[in-house]
Image (cartoon, grey):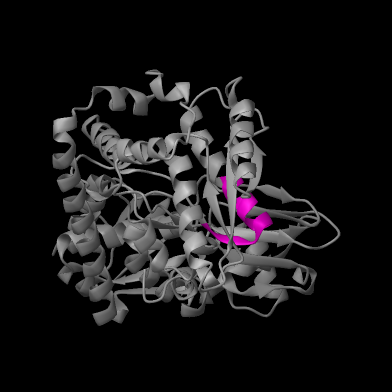
Amino acid sequence: MTDLDAVCAELKLEDEKAIVAAVSGGSDSIALLILLHDYLNKLEATQTVPQLVAVTVDHDLRAESAAEAQFVAQFCAQRNIRHIIKVWKAEKPSTGISAAARAMRYHLLMEAAREAGASMIFTGHSQDDQVETYIMRQSRQKNASGEGANDFRGLAGMAVFTLLAREFLLVRPLLNARREALRDGLRGRNIQWIDDPTNLDTHYERPRIRQTRKEEEHQSYLTLIDQAVAKRTDINQQVADYWDANAQLAKLVAPDIVLLDTALLAAMPQEAASLFIGFVLAHIGGKNHLLRFEDRDFICQTLSASQLSQKRMNYAGCVIEAGLKHHRIWREHRNLPVVSVAQKSKILWDQRYYIQNNSDEAIEVRPVARDDFHGFCLNNDLNRHDFFQPAVFSCPGIYKKNQLCGLPALGFQCAEMNDISVSKHYALLDNVLTGHDFILASRFYQHFGGGELNPVANICRKFHKNRL
């Protein structure tokens, strides 16, 4: 009925202290919990097994949600399964509630996983969810903004494995199971579940799709999803292979400056080059999404032209400077934040840098001012002409009492920065990294972040007997 046993067999569950199952009380999540419970019980006879921890997220959006969480608590207590309830207590946004609830759900699931000592989070997404997701994304593309109608990447749907926050492996073992088959399995064992009324509320997109899609088209959608996955995987592999064979394709000359080899980029297959450019721009610009397909194609065509019609372009928060031997990309000097960081606290600056202030006083992080940079170079015996200054001025400066005391992006700091740590954040990859992109993401971490910092390689070594 499901691939759960096969998926779990590929994971090193015996090395885990605990695993988390996200359980709302609906049929899919209850089926997931029962199947995981059965699987671990079978394994227990021959090996050490992790503790199964069910986590229910109460979004506090409906009056019934607390009672539903208690239903799951009682269900778990009857089976001696540890259960944790996490409540979204913060004020809710007036718009975009579905996206906000989804983001909070994963945040609370990760919080619970840390508390339980778990590195894996299982969810009960079914094949029906996968098809609904495809239809929703296809509809958005046809309606035009975001990634264009010709962009196949989103149509690949959900992956069985996804990396969350460089820390947790999200596992969806039921993507090949039909919802009704899961329910039949529960009925056969006289197991009840909760029907969430939100799933019937046509104010929301997914219930509208669920009620209007035709069952006879289901298999056709699965074929389209498989085709999108194959194409996404193929283009990712093309980029990875080309970069492996041409190491000089992209060179990170400073944390926020990339040089692209003009000839190598021009010789790259068109779709691979378009995707590659999108990843580079997202990295440098601090974006958690790719630039539109049409814009990526335009940039590639412009940079590959024998006569460069545009010397500079601005896209995705970046400046792209075309050159005969190299194209140079850096973060543009626009919309850069000024942030106060309290003592013993941490912030994410410009979606590019984590700043941890372990000192006993507040600091300020802001883009480096020209006069401050010149003074910093003079005081620290640095030649300011050794630096590409347009990029310097979009880097984070660490200020104490209005004095620049560090330029961590360039590797320079004063003694006043001893209690301040700075680490790079890859907005496109570090938050949610679908398994569809593991191969390509691994190359970006390898070339731009150092092999030892490659979370894809780390997660594969930790969880998988071979390779995810």
Give the residues in magenta: 107-120
Quadrant of residue 142 in the image?
top left
- 24 left or right, relative to 140: right
Residue 390 in view of the camera: no
Q: Is residue 405 above or below residue 325?
A: above
In the rendered structure, does residue 113 fall within the stretch colored magenta?
A: yes
- 198 left or right, relative to 249: right
- Residue at the right extreme, as displayed: 360
Out of 14 and 268, give the one closest to the viewer: 14
Out of 351 and 258, give the one closest to the viewer: 351
Out of 336 and 453, give the one closest to the viewer: 453
Locate residue 8, reporting x and y percent.
42, 63
Query: Total number of numbered labels?
Result: 0
Locate residue 410, reporting x and y percent.
58, 71
Secondary structure mostly seen in the magenta stretch: helix
Quadrant of residue 310 in the image?
bottom left
Q: Is residue 234 above or below residue 335?
A: below
Locate residue 284, reporting x and y percent.
44, 59
Locate residue 240, reporting x and y percent.
28, 71
In the rendered structure, does residue 127 fall within the stretch colored magenta?
A: no
Residue 317 in view of the camera: yes
Q: Could you tell me which quadrant the C terminus lies in?
A: bottom left
